[in-house]
Amino acid sequence: MNLPKSIITFAIITLNLIASNIFAQEKIDVVYMINGETKEGKVTGIHETSIDFVYTGEDLTYELKKSNIQKIVFASGRTQIITQPTEQILNTPTSTAAERKNKLAVLPFTMVSNDQGLMSEAMSGQIQHAAINSFKE
């Protein structure tokens, strides 16, 4: 039985593509932290106050506190909410306009210098106090 070479070549290429897709689709768990970070790997255990987590491509097991985790999306597609994010009230002033009238906020100054002998923290504080004093006069 002689099959044309093009059919055999097509069959071999198709089988290679199917096999590579099967091995390339290793799914991972994604841990969403409250601070906005995402960690990809495998959740290996869930405890009362923590979870065990292994990063993709590593063997070391990390213990992540549940209080720092918002949710976990498992490789199967299931999502488990660990900590409900707190509702942030936006655009709600903590003081009235009358309380803020004639008041000024001076934000912290940061000084960056390449001079090793200069103490940038001390200079930053000094600049901030000079700005505050200039408004008092």
Image (spheres, rainbow, N blue to C red):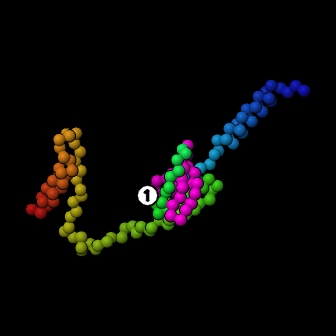
Residue 70 in view in this figure: no
Kindly identify the residue that appears in the image at 52 percent across and 47 percent down. 60
**Is 114 situated above or below 72?**
above
> Which residue is more in the foreground, 96 or 38?
38
Q: With respect to residue 116, does 4 lie above or below? A: above
The residue indicated by pointer 1 is 35
**x and y percentages locating residue 68 in the rendered image:** 46, 60
Residue 57 in percent (x, y) is at 55, 43
Identity, as a three-letter code, of the amino acid under mark 1: Asn
Disc 1 is placed on an element classified as loop
| Foreground residue among 42 and 77 | 42
Residue 48 magenta = yes
What span is colored magenta in the figure? 31-57
- Viewer-proximal residue, 17 or 91? 17
Image coords of residue 39 (percent x, y): 51, 51
Residue that sits furthest to the right in the current view? 1
Name the residue rendered at 23%, 45% in the picture: 112
Q: Quadrant of the C terminus?
A: bottom left
Q: Quadrant of the N terminus?
A: top right
Name the residue: 17% across, 43% down: 118
